[in-house]
Structure formats: C-alpha cells, structure tokens
Image (cartoon, rainbow, N blue to C red):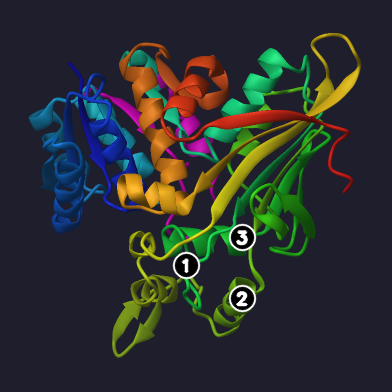
Amino acid sequence: MSTILVIGAGGVSSVAVHKMAMNKDIFTDIHLASRTKTKCDAIAASVKQRTGIDIATYEIDAEEVPAMVNLIRRINPKLVVNLALPYQDLPIMDACLEAGVDYLDTANYEPKEEAKFEYKWQWAYHDRFRENGLMALLGSGFDPGVTSAFAMWLKKHKLKTIRTLDILDCNGGDHGQAFATNFNPEINIREVTAPARHWENGDWVETPAMSVRHEFNFEDVGPRNMYLMYHEELESLARFVPEMERARFWMTFGDEYIKHLTVLQNVGMTRIDPVMYEGKAIVPLQFLKAVLPEPSSLGSTTKGKTNIGDIATGDALDGTGEKTFYIYNICDHEEAYRETGNQAVSYTTGVPAMIGAAMMLTGKWQGKGVFNMEQFDPDPYMEMLNTQGLPWQVKELPGPLPF
C-alpha cells in the first residue's frame, strides 16, 4: 500500500496522476494539491472518468512550509512528488525534511529573481536527507530525467566510456496558435532567453541565447532548426560521467516562435524584475503568462510528434573501437491526448515522473540523501518506459554530429 502526494496541477501533473491511477497496484492512494483547487478537481474528475479511481484534492501554497508540513502529516504519504514550479523546490524539500517523507521532482531549483538554474542548492540538502534517513530524487522528467537514463543505459550496455554527448529535443507539434508555449510560459521563456552553456574539456562554455543553430532531420518529424541551450542535466551528467569531454543540449524552435519571442524581448515583456503599473508592482513575464494560452488547453488541437534523445560517442564495450549510438523516443501528441487529455510535451514529462516515483515506491531505487538519475541502475526505469507509453529505440550511427 503506497500513499502518494502530488504537488502542482498543470499538464505534467495531470499526466502523472492519470498514469499513477492506471498503475493502482503501485499507487494505491493518490492525493493532489495545488494553489488552485479547482485545477486539482478538474484533473480528479478526468481521472475518475477515465480510470474509475478517486483522487483526493487540496488547496495549498507550496511556498508556505508550515502549511505544507501540516498537509503532509495529515495525509501521511510515502512520497511527495513535486510537479509545481522550479522555484518552489526548496520549500517543498524543507517541508519533506520536517515531515519525514521522501521527495521527487522533475526540474531543479531556480530562484524567482534570477533566470539561473543549477543543482548546487538542492545538492546542498544531501546530508540533511541522509541524516534523516530520507531519499530525494531530482529531475525525473524527460529532460532532465529520461535523457540521463538514456546516457547511463548506453554506458552500461553499449559504451565503455562516453566521450561526447548531444541531447536533442524536438517538438514537431502544431497547436494552431500564433504564439504559445507547450509548458509553463514563465519557466519556458526564462529557460529559452537565458545564455546557452555547454560542457567542454572540463569547463562551461557560454554563448548568447539562441545564437548557435543547426538543422537536424528528426525521424517522424523531418528537418528542424535546433538551437544550443543550457539544460540542467548537463550539470549532473558532467558530474557523474567524469570522462565526458563535451556535452551539449539542443532544442528545436520554429521561425514563428523565434519571431514572436524576439519582439516580446525587445518590448520588455520577458523581464522577470517588477515594474510599476498604476501604483502596483507587476512582473512583465508573469503578466505575459496570464494572457498566453494555458499549455494544458492545447492538447485537443495539437497534432504531430515529439522526438527526444541522446547521441553518444565513446569506446565500445565490445572492444571494437569508437562507436556512436542514437537512443530516442517518439511520442504522438494525439495519442497522448487520447490517453490522458494532455499533449505530448506534458506526457513526456509526466510519465517519467510517475516512473521515478514507482522506482522509489517499489524499492528498485533506494538510498539516503539527494540523488540524480545517473546514480541508479537505468534498466528498470527503461523497462517501464517501454510499457508505460514512451517506448525507445537505439541505433548505431556512422559517427557523432558533424558540428
């Protein structure tokens, strides 16, 4: 019997809770809380209609630690799954420590006042979780998350070492909107407009945001422009794959997205510092989020597929010299919507969140302290990807990316 508490009520949370209800042998008692209880209630109604499972819902401000502690103690879950905003990670971890419960999230901490995300703040919690006999699993989404499991599976089964790694994230979906983001607009735009960084020869190399672009032909999607970005799994991969000489992250964006984002930046709408308007302080990016389409509303209109994976080059395990492997998943927006009522961007993060939780609840992944995906055996996680809607494939390439 495993009671679980999920925090957050966006598209990712909706997918995760639906998939938890579809695995009732692992998740026997599911609770859902967020700042807006009506969003929780809508997810619970969809889960009930699709699976027949009842979900208990609550209103909570995840940044109010005493309230979070009270809720956790009231529910007494075995695990808290944080699917709220990245800048709420630390308060939720604090609440888990005080209440004595394990923790999982899908994205690392990011301060509200600065578009900078790195693991140092959460890694600093390791000793406290260890001393309290608790486990925290960081970054069990797709990227971060599955992309790290992909890399470690290749290192276990195909490559003795990983010399270079490229993570490629392509969303080939079309939602019919002039401009919209497929996950939380505030987080998406903060991420995209931050300077790009990649790991090379033992150090970080920084370039201006969206300044490095290359075309890649993605299976089932076609040729797309992809841009060099920073993503947090680069930091954990650089730590846990120490022989790696270079690691990069690429994400695709269409010309219309780039055009609209450029205009919004130029007029100051992506600013994260408060400005005064009619005697009140408002954050332009938060206002923009309020007027953009809600990502969870895009599911019914989004068509096309995502293609996300790793290209890794290194010494082959079989001793045949240097080899390159491409391991990836293709997810269909319409199929994801039929199953959970959410588009594939939410699906590809929500399903891995559920699988990470399953790893912890079943004891397949165990530990005391704060852990990243790279520290555990990828095989049981990868097996569940295949059975839970995110099947993967791997093929050998003639060589690494030519750029």
Give SS at disc 3: loop
Q: Quadrant of residue 329?
A: top right
Specify the amino acid type for callout 3: Ala
The residue where tag 3 is placed is: 194
Q: Position of residue 336 (x, y in %)?
A: 40, 47
Residue in front for this viewpoint, 182 or 371: 182
Residue in front for this viewpoint, 316 or 67: 316
Q: Quadrant of the N terminus?
A: top left
Q: Mark 2 and mark 3 in contact (Cβ < 8 Å)?
A: no
Which numbered disc, 3 or 1, marks the residue that appears first in the sequence? 1
Residue 83 seen: no
Specify the amino acid type for callout 2: Glu
Q: Is residue 280 magenta?
A: no
Q: Start and end of the magenta stretch?
A: 100-127
Residue 128 seen: yes
Q: Main secondary structure of the magenta part?
A: loop
Q: Position of residue 53 (x, y in %)?
A: 14, 35
Residue found at x 25% / y 38%: 6
Q: Quadrant of residue 153?
A: top right
Specify the amino acid type for callout 1: His
The residue where tag 2 is placed is: 256
Left or right, residue 60 beside residue 265: left
Give SS at disc 1: loop
Q: Report the Cα–Cα distance between label 3 and label 1.
A: 25 Å
The residue where tag 1 is placed is: 175
Q: Report the Cα–Cα distance between label 2 and label 1.
A: 12 Å
Q: Report the Cα–Cα distance between label 3 and label 2.
A: 19 Å
Mark 1: few, some, or many residues within 10 Å (few <14, many ≥20)? many
Left or right, residue 27 beside residue 153: left
Give SS at disc 2: helix
Left or right, residue 110 beside residue 98: right
Mark 2: few, some, or many residues within 10 Å (few <14, many ≥20)? few
